[in-house]
Amino acid sequence: MKQKSGDISVATQGRGVLDVSAQISRWVRDTGIREGILTIFIQHTSASLTIQENADPDVLLDLQDFFDVQVPEDRHKYRHSAEGLDDMPAHIKSSLTDVSLTIPIYQGAMRLGTWQGVYIFEHRSQPHQRNLALHILGN
């Protein structure tokens, strides 16, 4: 059994959903591990991870719109606003989604479904540098 750890740094453009499947796939391939389990962890509290459809971009826009309606930017709703109006809503959105994902590895690749991709869900309005901590265990 082998294991590898690493990091991927990704620049976001502000609020939105960013496909990071290709970067993670390259990292997995470079480990040489053909079968195992991959854990992806985002080291932030105002962005999250999701596995979502990668065919129709409207899915990602609808997902973002849904969260913006459910968790609006409203200075009267939240006590915490240290980093701006979008700060607390970003923390709530992050807690409602995932900060880590576990994906099987088979034949040296993520075993995602045909229409699935791995995404960073950026909840802040401004661009940020986001770090993904990766760990793979397998053969």
Image (cartoon, helix red, strand yellow):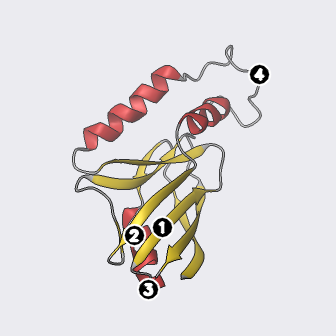
For badge 1, the amino acid type reads Ile
Q: Which mark is residue 37?
A: 1
C-alpha gap between disc 3 and disc 4: 48 Å
| Between marks 2 and 4 in the image, the one whose residue lies nearer the viewer | 2
Residue designated by label 3: 32
Q: Nearer the viewer, mark 4 or mark 1?
A: 1
Q: Does the CB distance between marks 3 and 4 fall below 8 Å?
A: no
Say the numbered circle drawn on residue 86: none
Q: CA distance from mark 2 to mark 4?
A: 42 Å
Q: Is residue 11 above or below residue 108?
A: above
Asked whether, in this view, residue 27 is left or right of residue 57, the answer is right
Which residue is depicted at the point 40% across and 28% down? 65
Residue 102 relative to residue 5: left or right: left
Q: For mark 2, give the secondary structure.
A: strand
Q: Residue at x 49, y 21 (%)?
A: 70
Task: Name which of mark 4 and mark 1 comes first in the sequence.
Answer: 1
Task: Give the mark nearer the N terminus: 2 vs 4.
Answer: 4
Three-letter residue code for mark 2: Ile
Q: Give the number of the mark in front: 3 or 4.
A: 3
Q: Secondary structure at mark 1?
A: strand
Contact between marks 1 and 2 (CB within 8 A): the answer is yes
Determine the residue located farthest toward the top in the rendered image: 76
- Spot occupied by residue 61 in the image (x, y as percentages of width and height): 34, 36
Nearer-N-terminus badge (3/4): 3
Task: Say which residue label 2 marks.
Answer: 105
Kind of residue at disc 3? Gly
Badge 1 or badge 2: first in the primary sequence: 1
The residue carrying pointer 2 sits among few (fewer than 14), some (14 to 19) or many (20 or more) residues within 10 Å by Cα, namely: many
Which amino acid type is marked by label 4?
Arg
User: Which residue is labeled 4 in the image?
Assistant: 79
